[in-house]
Image (cartoon, rainbow, N blue to C red):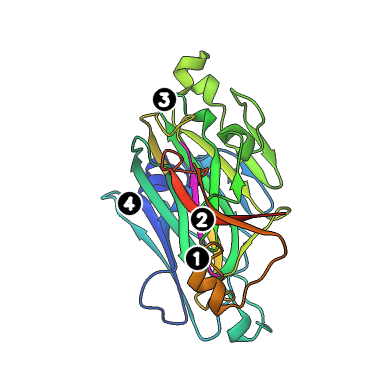
Amino acid sequence: MEADGSQEFFQNARIRMRWDRHNRWDVQSPIGIFFGSAVEADNMRSLTLRVEKLEIGKVRLSCYFPMPFWESAEITLVNLSQEYKAPLNARFYVDENSVPRSDGTYFTTMYHEGETVYGHDWLLYEGAGTGWFVGVVQSMQYGNYCEGDERFYIDGAVSPQINGTGTEDYYLACFWSNLDFDLPFGCVVGDVLKKGGGHWRGQYFTPACYSRYHLEAPIPFYSSINARIQHGGLSDIRSNYRSLSFCYINKQAGLQQTDYLDLGNSLSEKIHNYQATEQGEVVTLEAYPEGEYFETKLQDDGRYHG
């Protein structure tokens, strides 16, 4: 797509996509963050998304995510501003879809914007079914947000199976502050330190843009996913956040719980004919799970064994 390169176009134009006559949009996002540059037109290259600045204030926007459908596809661009925009030229590539519909997944996004809430991790994406979480573009402004860990709860887990070590690590930057860089699987878009006046304090008042694409490190799920990231080390920073996450999903769950044994519960043990040599008495353990609810103490019964 060759389009207007103004910041207003990046913020106020919306791209919407719907597959197979779904009742709601599968993709609904500001145009800039959808193509990986959330704030303004900055040159950015990854394996999935690209932004190239052209002459006379125009840009070339490229998206390489496959978007399967089986009946129809509807793609709409909406201008929410009152100003006329430069002419737009778009090109789409359509090929045969050899995947059976029952085995296929739909390309979806989740857009989230607002102010962070103390004690609650920022929601990147949540969905039920089977699929693959493939990436996120995030913009952050105000507060020392760099210490936030990504925390992904997969298939209904109480604690996150993925519990990271900091925002800058998740976005493959490794340390703070970060200069502009392009990698196949993640990018920092624009020189935030320079835009913030060359001082590290100023960069936090400048909207930043980070992206991470899980192509080399896939995150599959089989019944549900809840992907979040902290703002600050304990989700205690007041910041303005915007994020767009990409996911392939089939609403049919591939993993279903059919039974469970509640160890320490005499009735459950009897129903399941549970036996163990040198079985000990029932004991209660207490622990604080990792994740957003780390201050909540959980209790459960179990048994010691010889």
Label count reads 4
Residue ID for mark 3: 143
Q: Is residue 40 visible?
A: no
Q: Is residue 95 visible?
A: yes
Query: Disc 1 and disc 4: Cα gap in Å?
Result: 68 Å
Q: Tell me whether circle 1 and circle 4 mark residues in contact (CB < 8 Å).
A: no
> Is disc 4 placed on a helix, strand or loop?
loop
Please state which of the two labelled residues, at mark 3 or mark 4, is closer to the viewer: 3
Return the x and y of residue 115 as percentages of the image width and height.
Answer: 33, 38
Please state which of the two labelled residues, at mark 3 or mark 2, is closer to the viewer: 2
- Report the magenta residues as a range: 223-230
For the residue carrying disc 2, how many other residues have a C-alpha within 10 Å: few (<14), some (14-19), or many (20+)? few
For residue 227: magenta? yes
Query: Disc 2 and disc 1: Cα gap in Å?
Result: 7 Å
Q: Residue at x 51, y 55 (%)?
A: 301
Residue 219, picture quadrant? bottom right
Counting residues from the start of the chain, the first of labels 3 and 2 encountered is: 3
Counting residues from the start of the chain, the first of labels 2 and 4 encountered is: 4
Please state which of the two labelled residues, at mark 2 or mark 4, is closer to the viewer: 2
Residue ID for mark 1: 265
Q: Residue at x 49, y 73 (%)?
A: 267
For residue 269: magenta? no
Return the x and y of residue 238 as percentages of the image width and height.
Answer: 35, 30
Three-letter amino acid code at disc 3?
Answer: Gly
Residue 134, picture quadrant? bottom right
Q: Residue at x 51, y 86 (%)?
A: 71
Q: Nearer the viewer, residue 252 or 27?
A: 252
Return the x and y of residue 65 as percentages of the image width and height.
Answer: 62, 62
Q: Tell me whether circle 2 and circle 1 mark residues in contact (CB < 8 Å).
A: yes
For the residue carrying disc 4, how many other residues have a C-alpha within 10 Å: few (<14), some (14-19), or many (20+)? few
